[in-house]
Image (cartoon, rainbow, N blue to C red):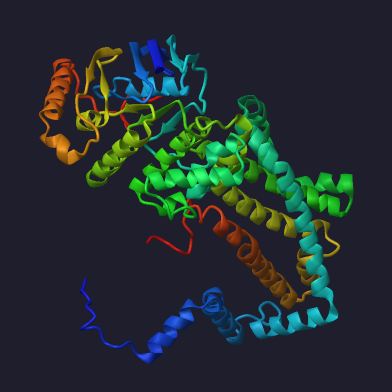
Amino acid sequence: MTALVIEGLEKVYTDAYSGEEVVAIGDVSFTVEQGEFVSVLGPSGCGKTTVLNAVAGFVDPTGGEVRVDGHEVRGPGPDRGVVFQSHALFPWKTVLGNVTFGLRVQGIRRREREERGREFLELVGLDGFERRYPHELSGGMQQRLGVARVLTNEPAVMLMDEPFASIDAQTRRRLQEDLTRIFEKRRPTVFFVTHDIDEAVFLSDRIVVLSHRPSSVQEIVPVDLPRPRTWRAAVDAPAFRDTVARINDLLRVDEDPEAGEPEPAGGGAGA
Amino acid sequence: MAVRTPRTRRPVPVHRRVWARLTRSPAFRTLGPFVPVVALWWILAESGLFPPAFFVGPDVVAAEFVEMVRKGVLPGYLSDSLERLVYGVGFGLLIGLPMGFLTAMSLRVRRALWPILLFFQAIADIAWLPIVIVWFGFSLTAVTFVIVYTIMFPLMLSVVSGVEQVPRELVRAARSLGAGRTRVFFEVVVPGALPSIATGIRTGLGYGWRALVAAEIIVGTSGIGFMMFDARRVGDVSQVFLGMIVLGVLWYMLDALILAPFEKATVERWGMVRSLEEGDR
C-alpha cells in the first residue's frame, strides 16, 4: 500500500522585500510505500526541506497535493511525525515526558503511555534516562530521543529533516546504523531528507534525486543492498559504491555553472 | 599552566582548608561581600569626617533598629509596606501576564495596543500620583494602582519578547505530535517564554518596590518610605539609614526566598538559562 503520495508539488515564495517571486519547488512527484525508506537528495538550496515541510503541513504548497494514507494533507498532524535537525525536544519535559507527549495528546492513560514510552526508549537505547532532562543528554542521545518521540506516536510516515547533520562524524555513523536496525525491526515508513550521499544510500530503499531550483525529480534511484545493513558490509559492497558513484554523477552533471553561493544554514531552501 | 599529578601534590595546609570550607558555606556567601562595606562605613563614621547629625555608624543604626522593633513601630510599618507590595504585585501579575500573552499571540491586538503601550509607558509611575490621590485619596488603592501600573509594562514587554523567542521548531514538533493550539500554548509557548518572563517579573518587582517607597513618601501615612521621610522631617538620620538598609535586606530576601528558587526549579533545571552565580564552566 502507498503511504505517501506527492503529486505535482509546487511552492512559490514571494520575497517580502523585493516582491519578487521565487520558485522553490517547480514540479515534484513521487510516492513512498508503506514500510519503505525513501530519501530525498539534491544540491544545496534545491528545496528538499521545503518538500518535507509541505508533507509535514508546515507550509502550504502553491500547487499540487500531498496525500498520506489517501487523505490530503492540511496542516500538521500526528500521522506525520517529524524528526528535526535541531532535535526540537521540549527542554521542560523529562526524557519520558518528551517521548510520551504524543500519547498524552491522544488521551492515553498514564500507565499505558509510560509503558509504551519505555518500550521505545529501550529501542533507541535510552532506557535508564527516563527522569533526565534533554539538556543533560549528548547530541546523539538527544536525536535518539527525537526518533523515539516520533515512533512512540506510530505515525503513518516518519519525516526526518537532516537529523544527523549537526552530529559529529563518529556518532553519526552509529546513529545511522541504529536507525537502520530500528527500521529493519519495526518497518516504519520513513521519508528522509539529506545532502549526504553515503547516508542516503546506506539507509534507503529508494533515493529521490532532485534537480537545481526550481526543483523537480531528476531521477529515482533504487538501492539494491541486502538488509540487515551495517557500515562494515556496505563500504565493501560493489552495489553501495556503484550507487554512490551514480548519484555523484547525477548531481555533478546537473551542477549549475554559477553555483558557488554558500549554502544557507540548515541546508535546503528552508521555509 | 602546570600539570598536577597525584604524586607531586602536597597536602593542603589546614588554614587553607578551613578557608575553603568557610567560603563555600551559604551564610558566608550571603554575608561575606557585605563585611568590607560595613567596615568601610564604620571607619567613615568613626573618623569624624562628617558630623553625627548627617552620618551615623552601624552601631547607632543597630541600636535604632532594636529600639524601633521594641516599640513595635518597625514591624508595623514593615507589614504595611509588604501588604501594599503584595497587593500591587498580585494585581500587576494578574493583569500583566494575560495582557502580555494576548499582545504576543494576536497580531491584531498587538497592532492596536502597541502605540498605546508606548504612550503610557512614557508617563512615569510617580507622575500618576497627583491624579490617583484625587481619585482614591491617601489609600491602599492609590498605592496599589501605582505599583500595578509600574509592573505591567516591563512584564508585558517581557512576555512578548519571551513568546517571540520560543523556537518555531518546538511549536512545529508539538503540532506534528497531534497537539492542538490550546495545548501548544500552555505546554510549549508558556514554558518556552518562561526565561524571559522570569526576567520580566524580576524587573517588574524591582520597579514596583521602588514605586512603593516613592508612593509612601508622597501618599504615606505609614510604611518604610514614610518612616524615612518622616525621620528626615524631625532630623533623625539614623532612622533614614535604617530604612535604607531594611529596603535592601527585604529585596535581597525576596530574591533569595522566592525569585531565585523559582528560577532554579524551572528554567535553570531545564538548562534554558545558566545560573548567575554558576558562571561559565
Indicate the position of residue A74 as horizontal and vertical percent values: 52, 17
Q: Identify which residue, A217 or A237, lies in the foreground.
A: A237
Is residue B46 positioned above or below B217 on the image? below
The residue shown at (66%, 78%) is: B55
Q: Can residue B57 be seen here?
A: no
Q: Is residue B36 left or right of residue A21?
A: right
Question: Which residue lies at the image location 56% right of the left edge and 78% below the top edge?
Answer: B27
Q: Quadrant of residue B265?
A: bottom right
Q: Position of residue A27 (x, y in %)?
A: 34, 9
Q: Left or right: where does residue A211 sit relative to residue B211? A: left
Which residue is at the front of the view, B238 or B9? B9
> Which residue is located at x 15 percent, y 16 percent?
A257
Whole-percent x, y for residue A55 in the image: 43, 21
Q: What percent of the width, then of the height, locates residue B5?
A: 22, 78
Q: Is residue B208 above or below residue A246?
A: below
Picture quarter with the C terminus of chain A: top left
